[in-house]
Image (cartoon, rainbow, N blue to C red):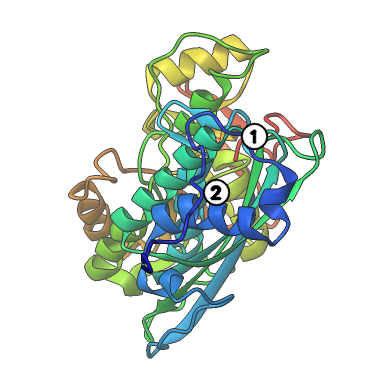
Amino acid sequence: MNVMTKPYKRKLDVRTGLVDLSHGAGGRAMGLLIESIFHKAFDNEWLRAGNDQSAFAVEAGRMVMTTDGYVVSPLFFPGGNIGTLAVHGTINDIAMAGARPLYLSASFIIEEGFPLADLNRIAESMGEASREAGVPIITGDTKVVERGKADGVFISTAGIGVVPADLDLRSDAARPGDAVIVSGSIGDHGVAVMSKRENLEFDTDILSDSAALHGLVAAMVAAGGKHIRLMRDPTRGGIAATLNEIASQSGVGFRIDEEAIPLKPEVAAACEFLGLDPLNVANEGKLVAIVAPEGADAILSAMRAHPLGGEAALIGHAMEDANGFVQMTTSFGGGRIVDWLSGEQLPRIC
């Protein structure tokens, strides 16, 4: 008598197992890893097709593409992890063009010996973040390197989006008189990450501000897109680097008001303890918008009505300055130059 049985299928020991070189070798073990962790976490129709690429319909309008790599240390920090950071950071790079992000890709370089439980936790966080944002991860790649050749896991992502035909945000568009608006408190991400570094660990209740900003951007564009000159997410180098970069590219200077800049007392205290300037500390869920003066009030109101812009503030203005300086009026009534960050103040912050 013939007995029909289901073929035996080995299960991945996600709870206690470790990544080994076979998980990147292209064989059964690699297929099991991808199916059990990544396909399960990111599940969507494109991944289920099982191709090495994904095909999708192209919407009308100008396309935007970005790519980024994530090497944050530690991998898990208050308010997020390397996976959520990879999703949010890539979406935000697309959103700063005023675009609606459509799809993401994700590539993993994993060190031999990395716990499968941690990898699964990272992948599940990425899947949740992408679903919450409505931006699916539709293709990817996995590589495993020998023990000691990486640092746990590195993630590279790419994203594409589409920009409305009547919107053109350019890095050289700032003009004297334009308003400088920040969407909320600065420095939260950098302080959250530093609070868990082995050589810096200190107590704080600050969470990373890591978040996808495309919904906030859409509200800003709806309120007055024609008045938005440009937008940036002030990640590495913080607000200081962002404004100096814009000043250099647009041929203007900026004057900002220290008292107008949203800053949590805990972040200020941590930065003082570590000898850091909050203006140089990274953010992962905030944006800086340069806005024509006639549109500043409407855009600021729209930002404050959105959950991710409740603390939005107008912190200064662009001005004529052949030197392209960023100047700040301090809380004591004095003034100082806000310069580029010198050297690497906070390595591996994203």
Residue 52 percent across, percent down from the top left: 59, 75
Residue 231 percent across, percent down from the top left: 46, 60
Is 210 placed above or below 163 here?
Answer: above
Image side of residue 321 versus residue 186, left or right? right
Q: Find residue 74 and report its image quarter.
A: top right
Image side of residue 222 versus residue 340, left or right? left
Q: Nearer the viewer, mark 2 or mark 1?
A: 1
Q: Find residue 208 and report its image quarter.
A: top left
Image side of residue 160 versus residue 144, left or right? left
Furthest residue toward left: 305
Q: Amino acid under label 2? A: Phe
Q: Amino acid under label 1? A: Phe
Residue 6 percent across, percent down from the top left: 39, 61
Would residue 107 be visible to someone looking at this image? no
Describe the element under mark 1 as helix, strand or loop. Answer: loop
- Marks 2 and 1 sit apart, C-alpha to C-alpha, by 46 Å
Residue nearest the viewer, comparing 51 with 156 = 51
Q: Residue at x 34, y 75 (%)?
A: 226
Is 272 placed above or below 39 here?
Answer: above
The numbered mark at residue 114 is 1
Q: Quadrant of the image for the N terminus?
A: bottom left
Q: Residue at x 42, y 71 (%)?
A: 48
Mark 2, residues whose alpha carbon is within 10 Å: few (<14), some, or many (≥20)?
many
The numbered mark at residue 43 is none
Would residue 313 be visible to someone looking at this image? yes
Q: Quadrant of the image for the C terminus?
A: top right
Q: Which residue is mark 2?
A: 254
N-terminal of the two: label 2 or label 1? Answer: 1
Is 34 placed above or below 58 here?
Answer: above
Describe the element under mark 2 as helix, strand or loop. Answer: strand
Residue 187 percent across, percent down from the top left: 49, 31
